[in-house]
Amino acid sequence: MGKALFAEEPDSGYRLLAAGLLAALLVFVDTRLDWLQPVRAALSWATEPVIGLADLPRQAVVAIDDAFTLRSTLAEDNARLRQENLVLKRHVQRLASMTAENARLRELLDSSALLDSSVSVAEIIGFDPDPSRMEVVVNKGAEAGLFVGQPVLDAEGILGQVLTVGSGQSRVILVTDRRHGVPIEISRNGVRGIVVGGGRSGMLNLQYMPVSADLREGDTLVSSGLGGVFPRGYPVATVVRIERIPGDTFMTVTAQPAAAVGRSRQVLLLFIKPSVASAPAPEAAP
Amino acid sequence: MRGRRNSIPVVALSVFMALLLTVVPLPPLLDWVRPSFALLVVIFWSTACPDRYGTWFGWAVGLLLDVLRATPLGTHALAFAVAGYAANQLAARMKVYPTPQQLMVVALLAGVVVVVMRTVGNLTDTTTASLGVALLPVLPTALLWPWALAFLDRLRRVFHVS
């Protein structure tokens, strides 16, 4: 090290070999087993500030926007929200009686009880820079009790599920990601299927639907509860286009996600106790 | 000797800035060609201080990227270790190469990184983009090199890192 000339000895090939082998071992262990989750969580202390800092400009804009909102605008907003609240309260009244009725009917049928669920609100603070991956980062993590495979909703429907959990941040894969699938049923007739993300297009594809299946444009697709990740009955998408190609076994079905993918900033994390303990099947391979 | 003491915080700062630029929101179209800032930092330190930074430095930066981007741990680490090693080997030449030739080396390393990561992605079945799309950021990364070099070299001089 202290030699004057040519003090810089380049790395030997053995060093690259060692680094390469260690990296390969990490890849193998991380993709086959889930031992490295603690390592990821430990290293996230270094990367979480990065994502937090990258989101600061947006937070500043929101804060400035809030600070300079006119009083009259606030009053208008307030009035509108009051009205909305009233309407929603009426819905809740009906919901309470219907839930009770549903529970009674289920008892008569000797069916399993309704699931008990609660939600927690989180904010989206980052997006994956890779355009081919539809993933977002939310500002809650293991400290708030999040877990891998947790369903994520917004006000309109299913948004995705938790992919990795850090201490104060988590990564959520959206329903529009090509690698993500949701088991669904058509709410009109209960026909089951799987919707897979369409990537950057922001649409979903309903897969393996026979050409003879009873499906119309405008049909609502809700989660079927199969697969053990998403609870039953949450809106997933609305069918917007159906192509029946003569001779093909399956039709090509495009659906618009119910959730405001790419627009919603606040998300709901669902805490739910699954009624059937099933093997984790977070992603249906396309 | 004074330079030695200052080295780690300065390098850490440059890595932090590179990670920040990796995730800072850009218009959706620019996302396709976002340069690999972390790779530029790895190449810079591996050529500027080849006696201390190289293979393992690239490996460590890659591991941080793996955590940041939620790729299988080791994917970026492997690719960046290769890039750090190659830059380390080429350190003496990079100092005398004219700019166009430096750009070619950086583009080559960026391409190698993409190919290595893609190979790992294919083997583990986690590939998401087509090869053409994955190669899009190679050229912007190379074109950014003169500015990255100027900025990081200034940082290095200001903090007396040698």
Image (cartoon, coloured by chain):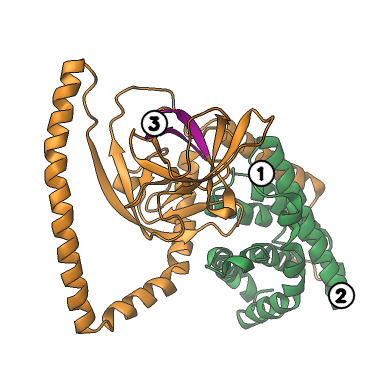
Chain colours: A orange, B green
Question: In the image shown, does B92 or B125 lie closer to the viewer?
Answer: B125
User: Residue tagged by mark 3?
Assistant: A224
Can marks 2 and 3 be said to lie on one chain? no
Judge from the rendering whether residue A136 lies leftward or rightward of residue A94; answer left or right. right
Magenta region:
A180-195
Amino acid type, mark 3: Ser
Tell me which chain the residue with mark 3 is part of.
A
The residue drawn where x is 60% and y is 35% is A251
Amino acid type, mark 2: Pro
Q: Is residue B29 above or below residue B65?
A: below
Return the mark for residue B100: 2
Question: In the image shown, does B146 or B56 lie closer to the viewer?
Answer: B146
Asked if marks 1 and 2 touch (Cβ < 8 Å), the reply is: no
Residue at disc 1, secondary structure: loop
Q: Is A56 in the magenta?
A: no
Tell me which chain the residue with mark 2 is part of.
B
Q: Is A193 in the magenta?
A: yes
How would you rate the neighbour count of disc 2 (Cα within 10 Å): few for under 14, some for 14-19, many for 20 or more?
A: few
Judge from the rendering whether residue A275 lies leftward or rightward of residue A33; answer left or right. left
Q: Nearer the viewer, mark 2 or mark 3?
A: 3
The x, y position of residue A10, in whole percent, is 80, 58
What's the CA distance linking mark 1 and mark 3? 28 Å
What's the CA distance linking mark 2 and mark 3? 58 Å
The x, y position of residue A249, in whole percent, is 64, 27
User: Residue tagged by mark 1?
Assistant: B127
Residue at disc 3, secondary structure: loop
The residue drawn where x is 29% and y is 39% is A271
Quarter of the image for the C terminus of chain B: give it. bottom right
